[in-house]
Amino acid sequence: MSKPVIAIVGRPNVGKSTLFNKLAGERISIVEDTPGVTRDRIYYEIEWNGRAMILVDTGGIEPKTDDIILRQMKTQAEIAVETADVIVFMVDVTTGLTAADRDIATMLIKSRKPLILAVNKCDSVGAPPMEFYEFYELGIDGEPIQLSSVHGTGSGDLLDRVLELCPADEEKEDDSDLIKVAVIGKPNAGKSSIINKILGEERLIVSNIPGTTRDAVDTRVENEHGKFIFIDTAGIRRQSKVEDRIEKFSVLRAKMAVERADVCVLMVDANEGVTEQDEKIAGIAHESGKACIIVINKWDTLETEDKNTVEYDKKVYTALSYMMYAPTLYVSAKTGQRVTKLFELINYVYNQNCTRISTGMLNDVLNDATARVQPPSDKGRHLKIYYMTQISTRPPTFVIFCNNAELFHFSYQRYIENQLREVFGFRGTPIKLIVRQKGDKEE
């Protein structure tokens, strides 16, 4: 990237996510007084003194642990260190210098990256507490920064030091053609696995423990197909099963990820099929007007006699009857089977979502449709449709003017929508129809 990358690292619960949110100016990372809440790397672009930079929040590093999640969090933090231009090493003055702090400092010094020591939770005004001076023992170049991530004090000094250590600014990239893709689905459907397969690296924590991903995580991908941001979202569970506060916040973050995405990839476990929860998750994307692709994952694990995509499609579209426009793709995130075809589909459905049709062509289709099937009538009142025009894209949105909106039944709206799809395609995107009633003078 042309913008410098700043990684915030440290052991769990020293206040990394609180600082990240304070610098970002909004609640990006989940903050909870529970070690291990932030598990993946979270990225956000900030600006300081006219200089743009990418801030990275990481899961806390536990140098010595047998816990599978904590081990993978350590790996994520190490990858963040490798890709960072400047590292902010955060410690907690209230707990003092720990053995884990020493181990992490050794690892960071060996990286030979520009390193800043931020001593957090110095919440009192004035001189730092005596424990502050313990951290000089770590042997990190430069004065430690006295910081309170809760109150924001010291954050300006921290960012000034970051700018001093940043590499020279480079020319900004043109991201006007970048497509944002939200990967959504139930927990353990393979969302993180497919992004890791695309990247060819362990970018996201993958585990068969449901709920491993708690934040919506952004990953940039550039290849021959274009520029993409993949947003790996926390798996959305049944509302009745969402019990703890962190889990509830993860569900909300997943919904927010759908809102800011251009394309939604719904991951479905081939062994389970489309469940009631999948229907609800798909409904979030559909109601948001996003271009959609239904990816059937773990296709390699099915018995040979069950691998009939035509029959499986029937089951999918029976469950997702409101999303019959969305194409299906049968993949294995584990082996990489057909994963590369996802890029072509993303570009295709995104372009369909952005399609604009001239008013003249629309009304030719409308006139043909009403000639084939007469508009409905009720008790001597007849529906008259005057004309149709497209008012926006993403999703394609059309306004139809008629004499009586009450007579324009849902079934006839669905008929008009089907005629539009038959002529113009709109594969992979919902269509929005708005019925407007003109005055009696128009009759």
Image (cartoon, grey):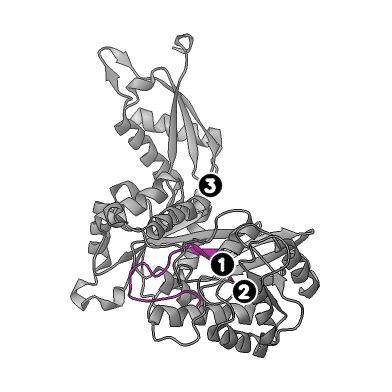
Q: Are marks 2 and 1 in contact (CB under 8 Å)?
A: yes
Identify which amino acid the numbered label 1 is placed on.
Gly
* Residue 433: percent from left, percent from top: 43, 34
Q: Residue at x 76, y 77 (%)?
A: 143
- Determine the CA span between mark 2 and mark 1: 8 Å
Around disc 2, counting alpha carbons within 10 Å, would you say few (fewer than 14), some (14 to 19), or many (20 or more)?
many
Residue drawn at (53%, 53%), measured in percent from left and top? 351
Disc on the earlier residue, 3 or 1: 1
Disc 2/disc 3 C-alpha distance (Å): 48 Å
Q: In which quarter of the image is residue 69?
A: bottom left
From the image, tell me which residue sits under label 2.
90
Res. 15 mark: 1
In the picture, the disc for residue 355 is 3
**Magenta stretch holds residue 212:** yes
Task: Give the residue furthest to the left.
Answer: 305
Q: Can see residue 200?
A: no
Q: Is mark 1 on a helix, strand or loop?
A: loop
In this view of the protein, which residue sits in the foreground, 115 or 92? 92
Q: Is mark 2 on a helix, strand or loop?
A: strand
Residue 362's x, y, as percent?
49, 35
Q: What's the residue type where badge 2 is placed?
A: Met
| Residue 314 place in picture, x, y as percent | 24, 57
Q: Residue at position x 47%, y 17% from top?
A: 438
Of the 4 image quadrants, the one containing the N terminus is bottom right
Q: Is residue 70 left or right of residue 101?
A: left
Range drawn in magenta: 203-231
